[in-house]
Amino acid sequence: MLNRLTDARRADLRDTLGARWIPVDRQAEYQARVIRAVCAPAVRRTPGASRSGEPGWGPGPAVPMHRE
């Protein structure tokens, strides 16, 4: 029963989403590109130093607590 349900769901996903088999090396390369693209903006906004001495993890620019 569970096998039939799983097979039916898998077939439905394949038909609905147009899923197809992708070689592992292509999938890994694609996932690496996605992660780099997601992280790139955060790396560009990273300040130069921090209180802990670790580069790039500082508190950022001061934000006023009230309107002037």
Image: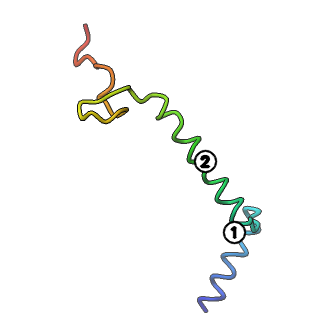
The location of residue 32, given as percent across then percent down, is 60, 51
- Please indicate whether residue 67 sits to the left or right of residue 45 in the image: left
In the rendered image, which quarter is residue 64 located in? Answer: top left
Instruction: Report the amino acid beneath label 1.
Output: Leu
Compared to residue 19, the image places residue 42 above or below, namely above
- Quarter of the image containing the C terminus? top left
At 33% across and 25% down in the image, what residue appears? Answer: 60
The quarter in which the N terminus is drawn is bottom right
Crowd band around label 1 with a 10 angstrom C-alpha radius: few (<14), some (14–19), many (20+): few
**Residue placed farthest to the bottom in the image?**
1
Residue placed most toward the observer, 58 or 65: 58
Q: Is residue 62 left or right of residue 6?
A: left
**Looking at the image, is 7 positioned above or below residue 39?**
below
Q: Which residue is mark 2?
A: 34
Q: Indicate the quadrant where residue 29 lies.
A: bottom right
| For marks 1 and 2 on the same chain, the one whose residue lies earlier in the sequence | 1
Q: Position of residue 65 (x, y in %)?
A: 22, 19
- Secondary structure at badge 1 equals helix
Secondary structure type for disc 2: helix
The alpha-carbon separation of the residues under discs 1 and 2 comes to 23 Å
Picture residue at 63% right of the left edge, 47% below the top? 33
Q: Residue at x 62, y 54 (%)?
A: 31
* Residue nearest the observer in this picture, 22 or 4: 22
Q: In the rendered image, which residue does mark 1 sit on? A: 13
Judge depth for marks 1 and 2 and give the one in front: 2
Amino acid, disc 2: Val
Binning the other alpha carbons within 10 Å of mark 2 as few (below 14), some (14 to 19) or many (20 upward) gives few
